[in-house]
Each structure stands twice: as structure tokens, then as C-alpha cells.
């Protein structure tokens, strides 16, 4: 018997390989993206690239399920082909709800190789924690259901006919005409999933029981859009620099994208009523930006009041956004030296088209750090909420 067993081992290789199933990659689901280059069943290596979606922006987002895993075995994931597509650590989940990070991968030119021991027969890997269309709808619906101070509404329908979920928050307090108008939006760039988690952290804080959140609800009307580019999030496309143009180069007199058009209308409507004060556009930055920072509008666009308010906002953000993903005071200007289409960037359009005291900024939350996960992003959102509350409480 022993001889037979040894013979079998020699012929067929180590026993665990007999037990392990065929690895299979599935990405045909909401937000999924993977082009499988190779699956080496013997070595348990999966080689993928982000799926190409011509005209739909950068190929940088990937998100897929792996089946056929022998629980406890180590899967090797080899991903390319651009710096935007290769975080130091990949996101991993065994239930498609709670996401962790793999240990840092090993770089090989434009590719990176992650190794992860999977505690289950199936798992999901992604560029970062996914935040799908269903998650946006769920956040809006569940918040409206559980809080009397939140109302869900459809911002608009996309060009492809999908609904763009949004939330409006206010609690009985100051008279409506004295309310501060706040607009928070995320995911003009579909691949920047972390920004929607920041948005979610903000919403949870805002509708939670912190007395400071209550104070803000009582004096403001807050509009929240967790995903602006619903169509690209739905199909797992990158969105950045898409055709005919990026959502964040669409803020002109003739916007192409419906969510931009309706956001502009609602912001202008509030501004005309003298009730618009703060705009924050949530994004994720470049791979090497390890601390969150704000893009600000060009100084030429700002009145004395605008400058004073912006400085005050940045100071309160610095006091509250203390990390682990901390705002340490870094700002960058997105004026003419930044992009030839700079006037069509959201915050620049908002600054130009609203009252002098309005603050409009872009928050870039780092995606390539050990804290760039669901929890880390949500803390940024909570701290952003506290910064906003402090900003309005201590206006100069
Ligand atoms: Zn962006």
C-alpha cells in the first residue's frame, strides 16, 4: 500500500493538488471588470488586466470573483498594466461585503504580483473596496428609511437610463431661508471607489447621534450624491478621460452628462435663493499621493470673502481630519496651469457661478496606503463632516 501511495504521489504530484478545484474567474456582475490573460491551475496563478471598455476612460479598475479555491490555499494574483491599476495592496473579500487588504504585492515592471491565503472556496479581488450602483442606492434608501431627517430622491436618469440616487438631509431648526446649502458628491471618476466610501462615512456621521451632526442638520440643507458616473460604475469602466469628456471636464454651459447638468441646476437654484455655501467633490488622487489633499480653485476666481472662507475651511479641515488618513494642509490649485479645460472642472464652475463667499473644493483621499480601506475611508468622511460643522460654527 505504501509503495502504491508513493507511486501515486510521484505520478500525480502533492495530494492537495488533487483536492483543489479548477480556478475560475467570474466578472460578469455589477461593477465587475477583468480580462483573464491566463490561469495556471497547477501553480494557482491568475493573470488578469482591467477589462478594456473603449471610449469609457482609463483601464484601471478591476473586480472579480474566483471560484474553485481549496480553503486555506494561497492564490497568486498577477495584475497589470498601468500604475493606476496596481495598488501596493489589493482588496480581498470572502463575502463581497467586508473588504480587507492583501499584504503588499511584488512589482514587476508594469505588473504587480499579490499572494493571498484564502479562507474560503470563493473570494473576490478588486483594485479597492468596490462601491457599486446597488451600494449607492442602498445607502440612500436605508438612510432615508432609518432617519426622519433624510429624504431619498433621484437626481436624474443617466444617458443609459439608469437612476442616479441622491439624498437630502435637514432637520427642523433654523428657518429655511437661513439654511446653509451644502453639496457633497463622489465618483465623477468611476474607478475612484474610495471616494464613495468617504461619502458613506460622511452620511453615517451626519445621520448619527453626534450632537455636532445634529447641529449641522439643524442649520443646513445637505445634498449628497454617492456616485455621479453611475453608467461607468455599473459596467466596471474607469471613466477618467472618457469620450466625449470626463465628468469633471463637463461643468460648462452645455454639459453632456445628465448628473452634471442637474447638479448645476440645483446648485444654481439654491444659490439664487441665497442658500448655497459649500461644495465638496470627492476623489482619489495619484498612486504616490500618500496623504489626502484639497484641490482649490484659482486665486483669480476668489474675492476677499471667498479667500477668507477658503482659508477658514482648510484650517478647520486640518483640525478635524487627523487621520489615519490625515489632511496635513496640502493644497493644489486647479487653474490654467493644471489643465487646459480647467474652467470645466466642477469646483471652478461652482466658484464662478455662485456667490462670492462660497467655498468649492475637491478632496483627494489617498488610495494607495495601508489605511485606504473601507474603515480608513469612512473615518475621512466622518472627519470631513466634523470639519464642515466646525467651519459653519466658527465663521470668521
Ligand atoms: Zn478623480
Image (spheres, grey):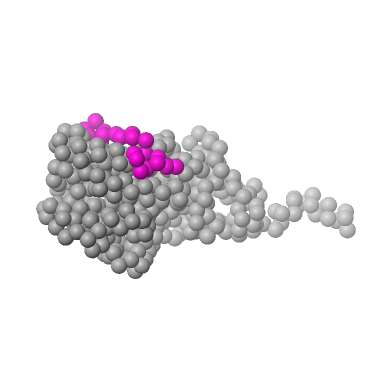
Residue 322 among magenta residues: yes
Quadrant in the picture for the C terminus: top left
Quadrant in the picture for the N terminus: bottom right
Residue 83 among magenta residues: no
Q: Position of residue 364 (x, y in %)?
A: 34, 42
Task: Using residue 344 as the reference point, say whether residue 67 is left or right of it.
Answer: right
Magenta segment's dominant SS is loop
Q: Nearer the viewer, residue 108 or 388?
A: 388
The residue under the point 39% across, 47% down is 380
Q: Position of residue 109 (x, y in %)?
A: 50, 34
Q: Is residue 14 visible to us here?
A: yes
Q: Nearer the viewer, residue 384 or 302?
A: 384
> In the rendered view, would you say 364 is above or below 14?
above
Q: Position of residue 194 (x, y in %)?
A: 40, 48
Q: Position of residue 339 (x, y in %)?
A: 25, 35
Quadrant of the rendered image containing residue 311: top left
Quadrant of the rendered image containing residue 358: top left
Q: Nearer the viewer, residue 100 or 168?
A: 168
The residue under the point 50% across, 53% down is 99
The residue under the point 45% across, 45% down is 372
The residue under the point 22% across, 61% down is 173
Quadrant of the rendered image containing residue 176: bottom left
- Residue range corresponding to the magenta coloring: 318-339
Amino acid at each position: 500500500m505504501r509503495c502504491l501511495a508513493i507511486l501515486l504521489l510521484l505520478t500525480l504530484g502533492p495530494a492537495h493538488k488533487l483536492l483543489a478545484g479548477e480556478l475560475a474567474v467570474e466578472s460578469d456582475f455589477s461593477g465587475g471588470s477583468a480580462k483573464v490573460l491566463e490561469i495556471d491551475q497547477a501553480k494557482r496563478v491568475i493573470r488578469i488586466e482591467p477589462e478594456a471598455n473603449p471610449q469609457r476612460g482609463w483601464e484601471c479598475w478591476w473586480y472579480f470573483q474566483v471560484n474553485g479555491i481549496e480553503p486555506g490555499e494561497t492564490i497568486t494574483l498577477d495584475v497589470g498594466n498601468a500604475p493606476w491599476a496596481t495598488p501596493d495592496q489589493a482588496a480581498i473579500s470572502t463575502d463581497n461585503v467586508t473588504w480587507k487588504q492583501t499584504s503588499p504585492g511584488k512589482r514587476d515592471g508594469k505588473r504587480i504580483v499579490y499572494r493571498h491565503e484564502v479562507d474560503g472556496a470563493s473570494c473576490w479581488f478588486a483594485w479597492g473596496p468596490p462601491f457599486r450602483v446597488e451600494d449607492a442606492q442602498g445607502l440612500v434608501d436605508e438612510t432615508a428609511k432609518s432617519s426622519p431627517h433624510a429624504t431619498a430622491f433621484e437626481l436624474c436618469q443617466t444617458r443609459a437610463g439608469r437612476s442616479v440616487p441622491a439624498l437630502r438631509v435637514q432637520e427642523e431648526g433654523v428657518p429655511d431661508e437661513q439654511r446653509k446649502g451644502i453639496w457633497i458628491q463622489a465618483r465623477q471618476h468611476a474607478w475612484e471607489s474610495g471616494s464613495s466610501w468617504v461619502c458613506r462615512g460622511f452620511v453615517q456621521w451626519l445621520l448619527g447621534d453626534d450632537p455636532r451632526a445634529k447641529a449641522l442638520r439643524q442649520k443646513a440643507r445637505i445634498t449628497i450624491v454617492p456616485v455621479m458616473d453611475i453608467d461607468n460604475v455599473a459596467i466596471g469602466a474607469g471613466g477618467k478621460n472618457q469620450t466625449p469628456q470626463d465628468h469633471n471636464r463637463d461643468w460648462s454651459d452645455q454639459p453632456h452628462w445628465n448628473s452634471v447638468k442637474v447638479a448645476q441646476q440645483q446648485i444654481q437654484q439654491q444659490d439664487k435663493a441665497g442658500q448655497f455655501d459649500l461644495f465638496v467633490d470627492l476623489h482619489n488622487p495619484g498612486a504616490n499621493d500618500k496623504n489626502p489633499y484639497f484641490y482649490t480653485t484659482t486665486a483669480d476666481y476668489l474675492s476677499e470673502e471667498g479667500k477668507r472662507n477658503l482659508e477658514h475651511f482648510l484650517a478647520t479641515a486640518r483640525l478635524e481630519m487627523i487621520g489615519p488618513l490625515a489632511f496635513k494642509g496640502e493644497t493644489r490649485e486647479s487653474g490654467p496651469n493644471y489643465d487646459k479645460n480647467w474652467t470645466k472642472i466642477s469646483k471652478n464652475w461652482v466658484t464662478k457661478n455662485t456667490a462670492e463667499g462660497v467655498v468649492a473644493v475637491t478632496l483627494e483621499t489617498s488610495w494607495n496606503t495601508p489605511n485606504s480601506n473601507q474603515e480608513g475611508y469612512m473615518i475621512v468622511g466622518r472627519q470631513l463632516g466634523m470639519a464642515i460643522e466646525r467651519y459653519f460654527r466658527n465663521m470668521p
